[in-house]
Each structure stands twice: as structure tokens, then as C-alpha cells.
Image: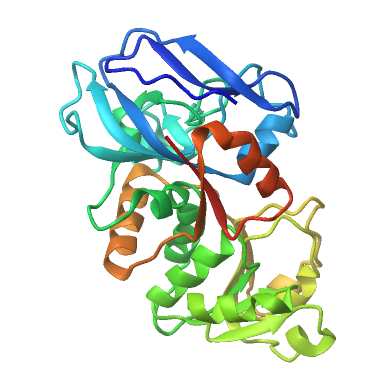
Amino acid sequence: MSTIPISTSPLSTIHGYAVHAAGAELLPFKYEASKLAPYDVEVRITHCGICRSDLHLIDNDGGLSKYPFIPGHEIIGTVNSVGSEVTDLTEGERVGIGWQADSCGHCEWCRKGEEHLCAQSQPTCVHRHGGYAESIRVNARFAVKIPDALESDSTAPLLCAGIAVYHPLRLHGVNPSSRVGVIGIGGLGHVALQFARTFGAEVTAFSSTAAKEADALALGAHHFVHTRESKGLKRLAGSFDLILSTINADQDWQAYLTALRPHGTLCFAGVPPSPVATPASSLTGAMKNMSGCNTGSPVQIAEMLDVAARHSVKAQVERFPMAKANDAVKRVRKNQVRYRAVLTS
């Protein structure tokens, strides 16, 4: 694959790697950028993580994709140019961009600082071009400053995977008295273990892969449960305040609900392929809950990055030159990356 030519700011033509049909390989691509809007910034991309959501968009699993498009939404780069009304960012600042690139700015949820719940939320690479490119333009509210202590390569995945697990930990009030379980030691789970430990919780890792025990303990888990052992989960009935599922696979969800304490919550950051069915009595008797969480607002992302900087939370990554994006995507598809792939310019 040929490399992207180097350009200087501002960029009227943006080069990247796009997919032109469902499941197709990425090919060099360029598009003409419109005039920079007053509240937008242009960011020169240095790093972009590869998320499984990118693969779903490449394959058009949810019917959302319009081709050709450039994937990528775990972006770190430097501000190249600012719109006429942007006052809190300047050229040269290092910023990160996650799943969201814009919102309406005036609905109930935007006014509350929960822009990720806006009905007009604009994802970074749905019906627009994303981060497997030299540059991107987004609303300045969604370009979050990166603390100096954080390295760009190990921080890029935090813009999606990180906030996807940090947000539910905060939402459900995890603290030093909490008992937290994390299902899955992968792209999301390995970050969730670090944040849960940072919050002071007693942390248990659940995995179907016994070989991941050493990694789980090194990442912050106090305990490890091999879920293929029939008694491993049963003996933990009534143990957890929060169980966070980070996997996209079906499980015995009833067993995890049984493992919750009264008022405990089973929260989904990953999306299993089949409907999650459970008798209502599994929830009512001890006032248990099930919930879901996706991304977070710019304010929440900024908070997460500050916590990561102060407590050395980082993604474990494998780095690939942008020109090797197809190789990286293939390795992610085959679950050969521990634990996140990051493209570098």
C-alpha cells in the first residue's frame, strides 16, 4: 500500500485509506475538505487506534455505512487550524477525538453536558471520514486536550475503549468499598481492570482463557476466575456490586446476575449477539439491575484522561504504520493483537 503524501496546513485535500465496499480492503483515498466551519478544528493525525466498531462499519454489519469512507475514531493529533469562533484551542496543541465528532449543542442532553446522548449526535466515521488519514475536521468541543504525561500511542485507544469502561465505573459509583467484576480480558477489559483498581475497588477478572491470568493480575485484578470451570462462578454468588461485561459474546447471564449482591448491577459495555433474557424475579428479589453504557461526553473523556495521567493507566498496544492499515485490521479480526492496534503516521 502506498503512503499518504505529507501536506501542510490548512489542508484542502485530505488523504487517507478508505473502504469502498462491505468487507473490502482499505485503499488510498482522497477527498476535498469543505471550508473550515467557525466552531470546527482541523487536527493533523499522528495516531489512530483500530476498534472493533471500525470492523463492524467496514463490514456494514449494522447497515450504517456509506461507501467509500475512511474508518477510525480513536484519534490523537495536533491542532492544524481553528475556526473563527474557536477560543479554547490553538494551533499545535495535542488533542484526542473519540467516537463522537459533533452534536446539536442545544438539546436537553447537550445542555446537561451529556452530548453523547444527543439525538443528533454525529459519530466520527459514520457518514463522514474518520481517522485512518492525515487529518480530520470536527467540532472543537469534541477535540479533547491530552495531558502531557500521556504517550499518544498508548492513549489513543482510551478515546473509545477507555471511556467505554471508565464511564460505567463512574456512573455506578465504584469506590474503595466496591467489589467489581470484569468479564473479558481484551481490548476493553484490560483497561477496565486498571481503572477499577485505580478507584480502589476489589477487582475480579473473568475470562474463558486460563492463560490470561498472569496478565489480569498484572493489570490490577486481585482475583481471576476461569469461566470454563463449572464451579468458578457458582461459588461467587452474592459477591459483586458491579459486573462489567466487555465482550461481544453470549454468556450465562443468569449466573452473573446470581453473582451480584443486593443493589448490584450487570452492565454491558460490550454487545452480545443474542438478546439478553432473564426472569424479572432475578432482579426484583434483591433489587438488582442491568444497564448499558456506550461512550462519554467530552467532559467525561477529559476527566478520564486526567485520571489516566495521574495513575499511569494505559492501553497495551501494537503499533503499525498507517500504510500497513490492512495488516493491522487483519490481525484485529483474528484476535491476534494484545490488546489494541494503533496506526501511526
Q: How many marks?
A: 0
Nearer to me, 5 or 194: 5
Q: Is residue 175 left or right of residue 41?
A: right
Q: Is residue 41 above or below residue 314?
A: above
Residue at (66, 48) in percent of width and height:
332
Quadrant of the rendered structure where residue 58 is?
A: top right
| Residue at the image point whose x is 33% and y is 28% from the top | 43
- Closest to the observer, 220 or 180: 220
- Which of the 4 quarters of the picture holds residue 138? top left
- Image location (x, y in percent) of residue 166: 45, 60
Q: Position of residue 339 (x, y in %)?
A: 57, 59
Kindly give the residue lying farthest to the bottom in the view shown: 235
* Percent x, y of residue 254: 78, 72
Residue 241 visible in rendering: no
Which quadrant does the C terminus fall into?
top left
Residue lying at the far front in this picture: please name it: 2
Which sits in the foreground, 52 or 18?
Answer: 18
Image vertical order of residue 335 relative to residue 79, above or below: below
Q: Is residue 318 visible?
A: yes
> Relative to 179, does residue 36 appear above or below in the rendering?
above
Q: Residue 198 at what x, y percent from top left? A: 38, 74
Task: Point out the image quarter for the N terminus.
Answer: top right
Quarter of image, res 250: bottom right
